Image (tube, rainbow, N blue to C red):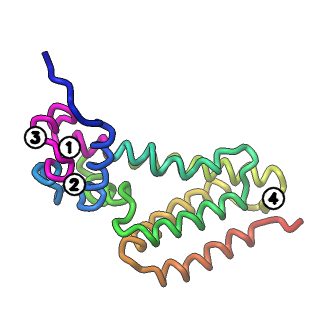
Amino acid sequence: MARSCNFDRQEKLVEAMELFWQKGYADTSVADLVDHLKINRFSLYNSFGDKLSLYREALAYYFDNHAMPNLTPLFAETAGLDELVTYLEEFIVRQSNQPFGCFLQNAVLEKYLSDEVVQGICTRLFDELHQTFERVLQGAQQRGELSAGVQCTQLASFLVMQMQGIRVLGKARQQARIAQAREVLMGYLKSLAVSG
């Protein structure tokens, strides 16, 4: 009969996510996980499988509980250019203040080419961002808030690209560059609004 664990599995998953987020996959050893989670190797393997399985699960948890909730204000049917600008402003602040960068961005750089599961989670993020931006932009355009000539699909791709650059610059502590680029990006987006 299998023994039940005497710890909160989700709590340990969050702790593992934080460690992988801080150190990356390659620089996090099983010994590091055992020490950080304060559980023995048997409990680690019994609860999460091997290191790679735990990393993948931690990345999926980050996607569901950190990345996606930030998009919630854009899911409203009435979300438009103002909400999109607010979302991007808040995103820039988060990236500027996060010492370890974005866990998903880190995974793109470290594991995207070598792991199909990681690839799937990261691609899903890009797809979700693009689809959400495109829907918000199209809605704003249909309501007459956004210039009719704007190509919403192309602009959504442009914004995803900008976010990736901001993530990298944030991790590199390039706040001055982010601040300067932010002025250009926000000015551009505001120039697309139809004045009432």
Is mark 3 in CB contact (under 8 Å) with mark 4?
no
Q: Earlier in the sequence, mark 2 or mark 4?
A: 2
Of callouts 4 and 1, which one flags the residue occurring earlier in the amino acid sequence? 1
Q: Amino acid at mark 3?
A: Arg
Q: Give the structural element (helix, strand or loop) at label 3.
A: helix
Instruction: Say the numbered circle drawn on residue 52.
Output: 1
Extent of the magenta region: 34-58
Which quadrant holds residue 6? top left
Give the number of the disc on residue 41: 3
- Work out which quarter of the rendered image holds the N terminus and state it: top left
The earlier-in-sequence mark between 3 and 2 is 2
The residue lying at 64 percent from left, 50 percent from top is: 73
Tag 2: amino acid: Tyr
Cα distance in 3D space between marks 4 and 1: 46 Å
Q: Does the rendering let one see residue 116? A: no
Question: Residue 36, how many percent across, how many down?
Answer: 19, 53
Q: Which residue is mark 2?
A: 25
Marking on residue 145: 4
Q: Are the residues tagged 1 and 3 within 8 Å (C-beta)?
A: no
